[in-house]
Image (cartoon, rainbow, N blue to C red):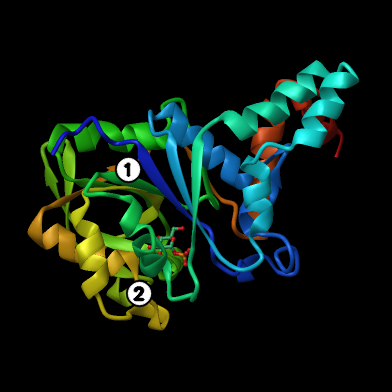
Amino acid sequence: MSLSNLRKVIFPAAGLGTRFLPATKATPKEMLTIVDKPLIQYGVEESLASGMDEIIIITGRGKRTIEDHFDVSVELERSLRDSGKDALYHKVSYVSRMADVAYVRQKHPRGLGHAVACAAPWIHHEPFGVVLADELILSSVPVMQQLRMVYEKTGCSVVALSEVSPEEVHQYGIVAYEQEGDLMRLTDMLEKPKKEDAPSNMAIIGRYIFTPRIMALLQQVQPGSGGEIQLTDAIAELAKSEGVYGVVVDGQRFDAGNPLGFLKANAAIGQQHPEYGDAFKDFLNEL
Ligand code: G1P
């Protein structure tokens, strides 16, 4: 298998966003804005910066605004151009041209593993990435690029990890691992374990690179935690057959799929914003 044909990234975006109700009643979680861009755009930009430019978004009912966001808005672009608003025109037209985006509909909410498996016909035996857009990670080297480097070194699937507190392990996929030189080889993993069952406090944080074999394993795994087809269960199987590595990511991570993490992400990115950053910092100091 060629290691260089890693261009596709799947964005599961069919979830109900229940942690963020009522904001997500009629707006997809992925479209909530951090400063001036929706969450999913950050994930797509991270993928592009990691050399992965074929985007597959898994959508469901009520997710049409995601498609509109990455589509050409002919009237808006014409109006901005005609009225000489060049900077805004470039921001808007950039979004519709930034990547090749395809959409796959997940008809039934059967879990993250099922969402990823919905894209199987578009993967064609190639390796691919998965990005959960509600995990926002600020880093100098894009996180998908950090994973890609380990994938290219090992030829194996790679997942992003971050340490969490024992009180938080029940919210994540938690891995067991062995150190192999400077790499972490995963030996097992559990989806949302109780504190006493967690094999470590290293959590999977929504960035993955997979060899195509994961698709076959996703067809075989039985419903797990929450009665859903869990991606984590298929990765555990992959770890036993092909091997899977973990990378503790270098960056600042925000779980922007819940209101507190979202506020923190807005505060951090707001302060770095080239246009609003200084004024926002002044405002925070005055508070
Ligand atoms: C999903 C995964 C879980 C992972 C988490 C990261 O869970 O199933 O393994 O740790 O994302 O955010 P979810 O948050 O969708 O329930």
Residue 81 image position (x, y, % from top left): 82, 20
Mark before the other along the chain sequence, 2 or 1: 2
Residue 256 image position (x, y, % from top left): 60, 52
Quadrant in the picture for residue 260 = bottom right
Left or right: 15 in relation to 95: left
Q: Quadrant of ligand 1?
A: bottom left
Quadrant in the picture for residue 25 = bottom right
Local crowd size for mark 2, using a 10 Å CA cut-off: few (<14), some (14–19), many (≥20): many
Furthest residue to the bottom? 227
Residue picked out by circle 2: 229
Label 2 sits on a secondary structure element that is loop
Q: Is residue 202 visible in this depiction of the protein?
A: no
Residue at image position (76%, 24%) is 89
Residue at image position (62%, 50%) is 67
Q: Which mark is residue 248?
A: 1
In front of the other: 133 or 120: 120
Which tag is nearer the camera, tag 2 or tag 1? 2
- For the residue marked with disc 1, what is the amino acid? Val
Residue 254 image position (x, y, % from top left): 55, 47
Left or right: 266 in relation to 228: right
Q: Is residue 64 visible in this depiction of the protein?
A: yes
Left or right: 62 in relation to 11: right
- For the residue marked with disc 2, what is the amino acid? Ile
